[in-house]
């Protein structure tokens, strides 16, 4: 009687405890990827509600379908609380589902192995005491949950720790590539489970050799999924370091340019007293013509020391002046109508990153037809709540623009996008903006949008 009662109640109790543990597992996995902590809590609660709902309605759904519905509900709620990087969240859902399935499969095999080993002990052989067998059954349920969630939590902890670029979104191409690993894990789980079930039905017993092969296969799949995330993030970090190195070099050049301008101003300031005395003597001696010429020359010196470009911010002044000088050395006409959006949330450092990368590309690739002069045109304007920046340069060639990313492939890497445009897009994304490139009519145009509030 007691044994029968436990056999009826324990599966439901075990399922309920498993669902509570899943709330914690989903919370720990999703928390680093959402802005608000309550989004991760609600994601776990959504899994619990979905599994409980489909467990109560009189519709037979398999364990895998129930897992899918629960994980889907969890990550839909996650997207509702944090609408950034939706493609990344799709990948995370597939990743979690795959790790969950493999953890369940490993726990199931280990549970069968331990149960068969304990059942063969003298303590249980020939002993039909209900409480003894009921205790064994309860112990096996607890063992299953411990093994499953030990594997699940350790795997998801490793993935969350190694997934360094948590705030970076995924492109469609990256999602397709990365999703192959969790999908292979899910398919491999079904294949091995099918063969294991078939072998058990055929031989009417559990094969230690088959279970050993299954465990090895599941462990390899689980390790492959974790390694793929680690390698992918390693590539992303390497790209970030290269982008950061480029920004540091840009800032060094800007600092040198500012120091040169400051040295000129300091020199002029040192001689200003002498200039004033000279002007006073010229006007006192009524040498008006010479005094006016001297004053005009002094005015030119002040203008040169202050810089030709006045954009409204000293950082962008230095960036624009540097690239203007570089363009003019190459015989490129440089036209500038840029004004820094003062009073907005856009930081001068981020704006200098955008301008440096855009103008460097323009200076490198500006060309013109025979008998024409190459040019670069930079302008900025406000459109509603957005700051629009347009960089145009003469260009007689033709480049391939990828449809899915809007960027240009480069020969600098194995199919990777040029760091310049990718860096501009990344910086614009911080201000909920984006970039667009176009070409035609002997001109290449880069348009950048930044939201100012």
Image (cartoon, rainbow, N blue to C red):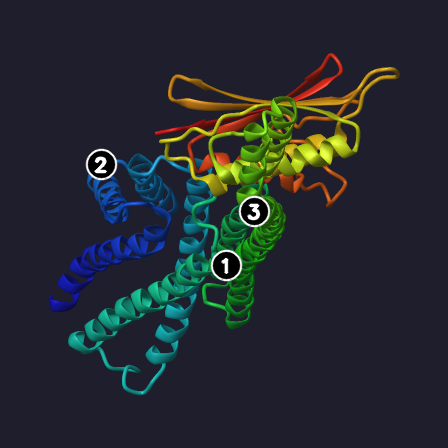
| Residue at 41 percent of width and 59 percent of height | 156
Name the mark nearer the viewer: 3 or 2: 3
Which quadrant of the rendered structure holds the N terminus?
Answer: bottom left
The residue singled out by tag 3 in the image is 262
Of the two numbered discs 2 and 1 on the same chain, state the one appearing first in sequence: 2
- Is 188 located above or below residue 397 in the figure? below
Quadrant of the rendered image containing residue 323: top right
Query: Which of the labelled discs sits on residue 58, or is there none?
Result: 2
What is the tally of numbered marks visible in this picture? 3
Whether residues under marks 1 and 3 lie with C-beta atoms below 8 angstroms apart, the answer is no
Q: Nearer the viewer, residue 202 or 51?
A: 51
Query: Which of the labelled discs sits on residue 196, or is there none?
Result: 1
Q: Residue furthest top?
A: 441
Element type where label 1 sits in the image: helix
Of the two numbered discs 1 and 3 on the same chain, state the one appearing first in sequence: 1
Quadrant of the rendered image containing residue 90: top left
Of the two numbered discs 3 and 2 on the same chain, state the one appearing first in sequence: 2
Name the mark nearer the viewer: 1 or 3: 3
Give the CA separation, mark 2 to mark 1.
29 Å
**Residue 428 x/y as whole percent:** 49, 34
Element type where label 3 sits in the image: helix
- Is 370 located above or below residue 168 in the figure? above
Which quadrant of the rendered structure holds the C terminus?
Answer: top left
| Residue at 23 percent of width and 44 percent of height | 42
């Amino acid at each position: 009687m007691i044994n029968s009662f436990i056999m009826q109640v324990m599966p439901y109790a075990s399922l309920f405890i498993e669902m509570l543990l899943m709330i914690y597992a989903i919370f720990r996995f999703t928390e680093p990827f959402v802005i608000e902590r309550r989004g991760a809590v609600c994601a776990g609660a959504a899994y619990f509600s979905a599994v409980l709902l489909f467990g109560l309605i009189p519709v037979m759904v398999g364990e895998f379908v129930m897992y899918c519905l629960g994980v889907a509900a969890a990550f839909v709620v996650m997207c509702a609380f944090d609408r950034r990087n939706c493609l990344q969240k799709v990948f995370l859902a597939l990743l979690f589902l795959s790790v969950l399935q493999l953890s369940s499969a490993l726990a199931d095999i280990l549970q069968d192995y331990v149960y068969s080993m304990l059942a063969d002990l003298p303590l249980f052989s020939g002993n039909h005491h209900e409480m003894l067998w009921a205790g064994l059954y309860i112990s096996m349920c607890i063992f299953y949950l411990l093994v499953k969630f030990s594997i699940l939590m350790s795997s998801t902890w490793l993935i969350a720790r190694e997934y360094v670029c948590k705030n970076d979104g995924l492109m469609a191409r990256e999602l397709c590539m990365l999703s192959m690993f969790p999908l292979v894990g899910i398919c491999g789980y079904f294949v091995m489970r099918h063969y294991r079930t078939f072998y058990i039905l055929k031989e009417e017993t559990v094969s230690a050799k088959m279970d050993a092969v299954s465990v090895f296969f599941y462990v390899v799949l689980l390790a492959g999924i974790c390694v793929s995330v680690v390698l992918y993030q390693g590539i992303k970090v390497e790209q970030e370091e290269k982008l950061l190195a480029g920004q540091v070099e840009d800032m060094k050049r800007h600092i040198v340019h500012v120091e040169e301008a400051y040295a000129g101003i300091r020199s002029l300031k040192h001689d200003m007293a002498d200039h004033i005395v000279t002007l006073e003597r010229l006007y006192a001696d009524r040498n008006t013509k010479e005094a006016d010429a001297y004053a005009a020359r002094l005015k030119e010196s002040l203008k040169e020391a202050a810089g030709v470009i006045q954009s409204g911010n000293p950082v962008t002044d230095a960036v624009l002046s540097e690239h203007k000088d570089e363009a003019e050395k190459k015989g490129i006409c440089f036209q500038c109508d840029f004004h820094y959006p003062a009073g907005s949330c856009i930081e001068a450092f981020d704006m200098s990153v955008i301008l440096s990368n855009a103008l460097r590309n323009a200076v490198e690739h500006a060309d013109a037809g025979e008998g024409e002069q190459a040019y670069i045109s930079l302008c900025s304007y406000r459109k509603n709540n957005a700051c629009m920046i347009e960089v145009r340069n003469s260009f007689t060639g033709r480049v391939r623009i990828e449809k899915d990313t809007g960027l240009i492939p480069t020969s600098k890497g194995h199919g990777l996008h040029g760091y310049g445009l990718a860096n501009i897009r990344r910086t614009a994304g911080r201000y909920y903006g984006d970039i667009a490139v176009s070409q035609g009519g002997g001109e290449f145009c880069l348009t950048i949008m930044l939201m100012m509030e």
